[in-house]
Amino acid sequence: MNLTDSKKKLALGGAVCGIVAACLALLGNPANMAFCIACFIRDTAGAFGMHQAEVVQYARPEIIGLVLGAFIISVATKEYCATAGSSPMIRFVLGIIIMIGALVFLGCPLRMIIRMSAGDLNAWVALVGFILGIATGVLALKKGFSLGRAHVTNKENGVVLPVIVVGILILALCTSLLKASEAGPGSMHAPVIASLIGGLIFGAIAQKSRMCFAGSIRDIILMKNFDLFSVIAGLFVVMLVFNVATGRFVLGFNTPGVIAHSEHLWNLLGMYTVGFAATLAGGCPLRQLILAGQGSSDAAMTVVGMFVGSAICHNFGLAASGTAMNAETQEVVAGAVPLNGKVACIICIIVCFVIAFTNKRKEAK
Amino acid sequence: MRKKELKLVVTFHTTADAMAMEKACKEHQVPGRIIPVPRAISAGCGLSWCADLSDREAIVSMMKEAGIEEEEIHECMV
């Protein structure tokens, strides 16, 4: 049976992913984070000591599961294809930019949807920026932007990232080499086996449904096509029901404890950066992991860029802080984007414009 | 729901080629429309050109003239 030939089936796939995220939240993942690609890559980079933010260090099995889930299902259904050669270094830079934008906002597009479903109005502000960023990327596409074509390469190339994530899993399970937070979001996680299975299921469904947060909006803007959007809608509805049913739905801006801030301009610009860069790179952070799993070395370069970007964010003080409650005074302390983060975000947007309007398609000879 | 029918679907190596195809087809008044690559054809998420089977010759000759290289030309239910 074909599970991807109608919007209803695609929405069902998204709904199953929503259930996976809800289960992981129930089993211990941070409130309102549940399943965030940017946060989880950042945590994994922290586990390797690439940055020293002690509260966000943990090798997230979800990331491992996503890559392996996409890899296994694509091999099993003969869709695995090793490709490479489409401007790898520019994609590396785009990966860094995506991560900086995401950590200025505090979340990837997947977490933005999860935050929206929990009533976090900051995420709705960010959605406006995300759509504007994608629209700017679409404008570049219409003006002839291209990173060049990828070519089929040795199949071993595409296996590198899946093998690396297996290595990370072995290190996490069998050694004490990796760091693990004792407090903060990094210390909050579902059991390893649940996270891994959740990642595998999510990765397999994302590969089959081509789930992509940037792509869904790109397709609506370019072609008024809602196929990819239906996957996201399914996920959103399930998370909304889960949040309302479990009393986690809190409508508002200043919501301590959910790792978000209310600097509207920077929520907007952070996700503008992510939307713009993701459209240029051909997919959101989740999609990059999935494409890498099904054999794209170019997407794997973007993933590597996201790892490096997360280290840059915390080593150079670019990442925003979340609104929190002071335990002693019971006062709400507003989260904020540091000056370094604001400057970096602006630089990232400028770099996106340079990439978008200098890389042009070449006519076939 | 719209009934699916057998169509000509041209896929490209890059999204930019698909965008160039849309522009060229409009200029040369070649029929068709841009659609996401059907899932049955690819696990990728690019764009493709969809037209009636009878338009194959007009499309192929226009692409040659405009310097647009296809990845593949399929016939599939859209």
Image: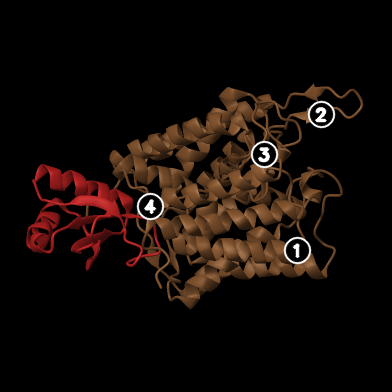
Chain colours: A brown, B red
Picture disc at residue A325: 2
Task: Kindly state the secondary structure of the residue where label 2 is placed.
Answer: strand
Quickly name the residue at label 3. Answer: A313
- The type of residue carrying mark 4 is Asp
Residue type indicated by callout 2: Met
- The answer to whether B4 appears left or right of A322 in the picture is left
- Residue A260 visible in the current orientation: yes
Q: Quadrant of residue A169?
A: bottom right
The answer for which chain carries disc 2 is: A
> In this picture, is B13 found above or below A127?
below
Work out how far the residue at label 4 is from the one at label 2, CA to CA, in angstroms.
41 Å
Discs 2, 3: same chain: yes
Q: Pick whichever of labels 1 and 3 is earlier in the sequence.
A: 1
| Cβ atoms under marks 2 and 3 closer than 8 Å | no
Q: Which residue in the protein does label 1 denote?
A: A192
Chain bearing tag 4 is: A
Query: At which x and y percent is residue A346?
Result: 54, 28
Residue where numbered disc 4 is placed: A227
Give the number of the mark in front: 4 or 3: 4
Q: Residue at x 45, y 75 (%)?
A: A77
Q: Earlier in the sequence, mark 1 or mark 2?
A: 1
Real-space Cα separation, disc 1 to disc 4, in angstroms: 33 Å
Q: Who comes first in sequence, dot 4 or dot 3?
A: 4
The N terminus of chain A, quarter of image: bottom left
Cα–Cα span, label 1 and label 2:
29 Å
Whole-number angstrom distance, CA of label 4 to CA of label 3? 34 Å
Looking at the rendered structure, the kind of residue marked 1 is Val
